[in-house]
Amino acid sequence: ANFTYQVGVFISRTSFVLICKNRKILWLGGVLQLFMVAFFAAAATKPFGSWWLLAPALFVGFLGGGVYVGAFSLIAQEQDPAYVELALSSASVADTFGIIVADILGLIVQGCVFGKMKVLDTSPDFKCGYDEIWSHLNRTVATQHYAAHCFPGVRG
């Protein structure tokens, strides 16, 4: 799914600048991303997916790459030429901090979802109150348990 997402990002970053000419399109992409967060949250907590979830992952990649390149393009177009470099640098730093915060929150949410669904992989650092399902799991155990809907065909 991550590879499919990255393909979508690549495609949209190379072509979205051609269609993103105003803020309305940019805001629409952000709102659609919020809807996709809700969709994937439902897909993570209620197993109803399979390989067809690659299509929404590609769509999210299109949205993410499009909003990224659209925002930077609009900054470059709307700012006073004397301040374009400063504005783009500031947006780049803010983007990096946003990615860091999102990655940290993603780790926490993953521990919570794994605990709720009783997915036993290696014990996560953050368990969101589900310590008891990992308490009997020794880190040196050779066999690991997987949720069939997360890893089709893997038994254990």
Image (cartoon, rainbow, N blue to C red):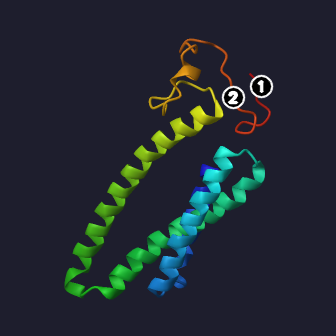
Seen in the picture, residue 38 relative to 135 is either above or below; the reply is below
The residue located at (65%, 61%) in the rendering is: 58
Q: Name the residue under label 2.
A: 146
User: Which three-letter amino acid code belongs to the residue tagged 1?
Assistant: Arg
Sequence-earlier tag: 1 or 2: 2
User: Which three-letter amino acid code belongs to the residue tagged 2?
Assistant: Tyr
Q: Which of 18 and 150 is in front in this view?
A: 150
Marks 1 and 2, Cα distance to the nearest angstrom? 7 Å
Q: Nearer the viewer, residue 36 or 80?
A: 36
When asked about the image quadrant of residue 98, the answer is bottom left
Q: Tell me, yes or no, if residue 13 can be seen here.
A: no
Seen in the picture, residue 28 relative to 45 is either above or below; the reply is below
| Total numbered labels | 2
Q: Which of 33 and 13 is in front in this view?
A: 33
Seen in the picture, residue 134 relative to 95 is either above or below; the reply is above
Image coordinates for residue 142, horizontal then vertical, percent: 64, 13
Relative side of 22 to 94, left or right: right
The residue located at (53%, 28%) in the rendering is: 130
Relative side of 1 to 75, left or right: right
Image coordinates for residue 153, horizontal then vertical, percent: 80, 33
| Label 1: which secondary element | loop
The residue located at (65%, 35%) in the rendering is: 117
Image coordinates for residue 114, horizontal then vertical, percent: 59, 35
- Labels 1 and 2 touching (C-beta < 8 A): yes
The residue located at (65%, 20%) in the rendering is: 144
Q: Name the residue under label 1.
A: 155
When asked about the image quadrant of residue 118, the answer is top right
| Quarter of the figure with the C terminus | top right
